[in-house]
Amino acid sequence: MDYFRFFIAESELVAMPSGALWWPAQSILCVSDLHFGKSNRLARKGHSWMPPYENQDTLLRLEKDLDTTNTKKIICLGDSFDDNEASRSLPLDEVLWITRMQAGKEWVWISGNHDPSPKNLGGSFLQSLKIEKLNFQHIANAEKCCEISGHYHPKIKVKLQGQSFTKHCFLVDENRVIMPAYGTYTGGLYCNSEPLRSIMQKKAIALMTGKKVYPIPISKAY
């Protein structure tokens, strides 16, 4: 099995190799930190030029996950755009691509710290969302439980047969999930660094993404 199934607040969730989270009982697909338009923002700010293909790559993976799960509802968990200008300057073909994917689905954009204001795209725009016992928000709150969040772009470095590998990962404990960044041009914070170490319980695991999902105790991270 390429996926990894686990429970939060008695709800079965599925971590997918792409970095998406699937909630089968609710037909919900959740992705975080798409960061559409990062190369565009860097170019506007005069930083190093990056090939402007990250939106297409991210959309291709998202479209595949939507087809695989046949989801009825998608939650984009904040920082879907690298800044507000990026949301306004999406190429028309990418706007139409997103519009096609939205057809027949309930689409929720959760506000993040990079993109707090509404976008001129379909769907609803919320600060947070609660479904049954699960709370969906962009940034984790260590005082709360049963939450699904993103923001930190967690990644893990492990050694295997003398070689080290760094991959995006989910962080999971009894109270919460911190999602990996889904966008193509995204860095990350090591899962055993602060503040992630303080937010997550000691028995938390990292679910390393890639061709399949590998569960690894955070204590084993390199």
Image: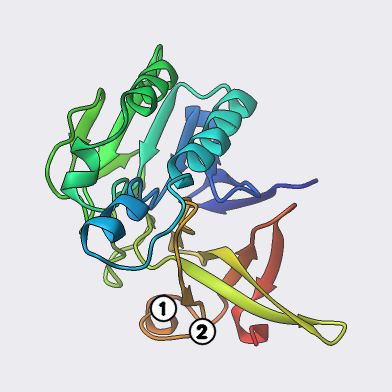
Can residue 45 be seen here? yes
Query: Residue 94 location in percent, x, y?
Result: 38, 28
Secondary-structure class at tag 2: loop
| Residue 24 visible in the current orientation | no
Proximity of marks 1 and 2: CB atoms separated by less than 8 Å:
yes
User: How far from the left and from the top, in percent, is residue 212?
Assistant: 74, 53
Say left or right for 3 vs 183: right
Q: Residue furthest top?
A: 104
What label does residue 196 carry, if any?
1
The answer to which of 70 and 57 lies nearer the viewer is 57
Say which amino acid is labelled 2.
Asn
Secondary structure type for disc 1? helix
Task: Name the residue furthest left.
Answer: 117
Residue 134 percent across, percent down from the top left: 37, 47
Tell me if residue 34 comes above or below residue 141 in the rendering.
above
- Residue at image coords 41%, 12%: 104
Q: Tell me what residue is drawn at x 24 percent, y 45 percent.
A: 86
Front one among 97 and 107: 97
Amino acid carrying label 1: it is: Leu
Q: Which mark is residue 192?
A: 2
- How busy is the neighbourhood of tag 1: few (under 14 within 10 Å), some, or many (20 plus)? some
215 w.r.t. 34: above or below: below
Which residue is at 22% across, 28% downward?
124
Callout 2: few (<14), some (14-19), or many (20+) C-alpha neighbours within 10 Å? many
3D distance between C-alphas at marks 1 and 2: 7 Å
Q: Position of residue 36 (x, y in %)?
A: 35, 45
